[in-house]
Amino acid sequence: MFFTDLARHMRVNCEVDFLRAKTYEGTKAGDVQLLKDIELDISGKNVYIVDDIYDSGKTMDTLVKHLKEKNPASITPLVLFKKKGSNRDDLMWGFELEDEYWIHGYGLDDERGLSRNLPHVFGYRMEVN
């Protein structure tokens, strides 16, 4: 949903493609799996990787490395939320979250893979063991 709202407000023509990566099983982070690659030729183009949240950085780091192999002019990671303390020098972000919150809604899924369709973002504290 963030991508859709962002694209709706762009004032320049652009091409859009999607890749799909998976890092989480419920609330447990695992290895990054690239499930779908892009189809566009991005050689020499300015590329923005749009995601909902930047947490550990593992997924974004993997995607940036993967797309750099396709010789774009530039790559800029852009997210709506980032966890406090996580950062990249080139990261563009909207809101910073405390580490202890899990959020869902507005395109983000809950621990069961649901709630993406909720119109608002909801956060709650997770128990830290």
Image: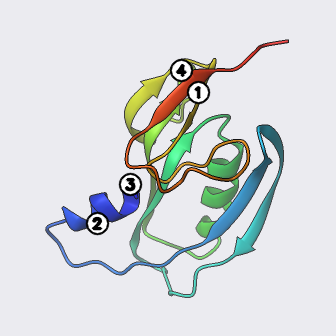
Tag 4 residue: 84
Separation of disc 1 and disc 3 at Cα?
A: 20 Å
Residue 94 in the image, given as x and y percentages of width and height: 35, 36
Q: Quadrant of the C terminus?
A: top right
Amino acid type assigned to the residue bearing label 3 in the image: Phe
Earlier in the chain: of badge 4 and badge 3, it is 3
Earlier in the chain: of badge 4 and badge 2, it is 2
Tag 3 residue: 2
Q: Pointers 4 and 1 in contact (CB under 8 A)?
A: yes
Separation of disc 4 and disc 3 at Cα?
A: 20 Å
Q: What residue appears at the point 48 percent right and 33 percent down from the top-left corner? A: 122
Residue 109 in the image, given as x and y percentages of width and height: 61, 49
* Helix, strand or loop status at disc 2: helix
For the residue pair 4 and 11, the one nearer the viewer reads as 4
Q: What residue appears at the point 40 percent right and 78 percent down from the top-left corner? A: 16
Amino acid type assigned to the residue bearing label 4 in the image: Lys
Residue 89 in the image, given as x and y percentages of width and height: 48, 35
Left or right of residue 15: residue 100: right
Tag 2 residue: 7
Tag 1 residue: 86
Vertical side of 23 occupied by 56: above or below: above
Q: Quadrant of the N terminus?
A: bottom left
Q: Residue furthest top?
A: 129
* Helix, strand or loop status at disc 1: loop
Residue 89 showing in the rendered view? no
Separation of disc 1 and disc 2 at Cα?
A: 25 Å
